[in-house]
Amino acid sequence: MSSKIFSMDTIETNALEFLFERGYDVWLLDFRASVDLPTAKTQFSADDIAKYDFPAAVDKVLELTGADDVQFLVHCFGATAWTIALLGGFLDPAKVRSTVVSQVSTDMVVPLATKIKSGASRPHFPPGHWGRVTDA
């Protein structure tokens, strides 16, 4: 997936247009998992995105705009990585005013086939940690 899901013209008004028309300064982020980037074919985890990609993106937007904070609309795997960034302490909470999370967040419910396919490469989360995968 890429940030194009928010800007495609397959509907009359997409998310980018909707927010822009209401006065928001909208930035679309393609982090390393974006199908539009060669990094999508490399090895990485949601933790990598949470620790490095999101903090760098927030800092860059704040630098370029002079704003005090950002608001995020996050979707799918990006929502999971974003939530890890917030709960893991990788983002300064003073820099994030609000977040809208779409589809998934910290607790993923996945089908058994997905668990089997990804089980060998899924990071281990200690008991009581924020990451948890449960059966569908």
Image: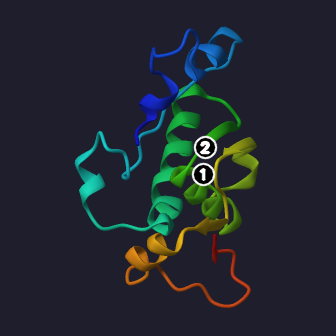
Quarter residue 110 falls in: bottom right
Mark 2 crowd level (few <14, some 14–19, many ≥20, 10 Å Cα): many
Circle 2 SS class: strand
For the point 41% across and 40% down, the residue is 30
The residue that label 2 is drawn on is 74
Q: Vertically, is 88 above or below 58?
A: below
Circle 1 SS class: helix
Q: Vertically, is 35 above or below 28?
A: below
Disc 1 marks a residue whose amino acid type is: Ala
The residue that label 1 is drawn on is 79
Q: Split into 4 quadrants, where in the image is the C terminus?
A: bottom right
Instruction: Name the foreground residue: 94 vs 9.
Output: 9
Image coordinates of residue 72 in percent, x first then y, are: 65, 39
Does residue 24 appear left or right of residue 122 in this picture? right
Q: Split into 4 quadrants, where in the image is the N terminus?
A: top left
Quick check: marks 1 and 2 in contact, CB under 8 Å?
yes
Disc 2 marks a residue whose amino acid type is: Val
**Coloration mode:** rainbow
Image coordinates of residue 103 in percent, x first then y, are: 64, 48
Disc 1 to disc 2, C-alpha distance? 5 Å
For the point 69% across and 12% down, the residue is 23
Does residue 20 appear left or right of residue 77 in this picture? right
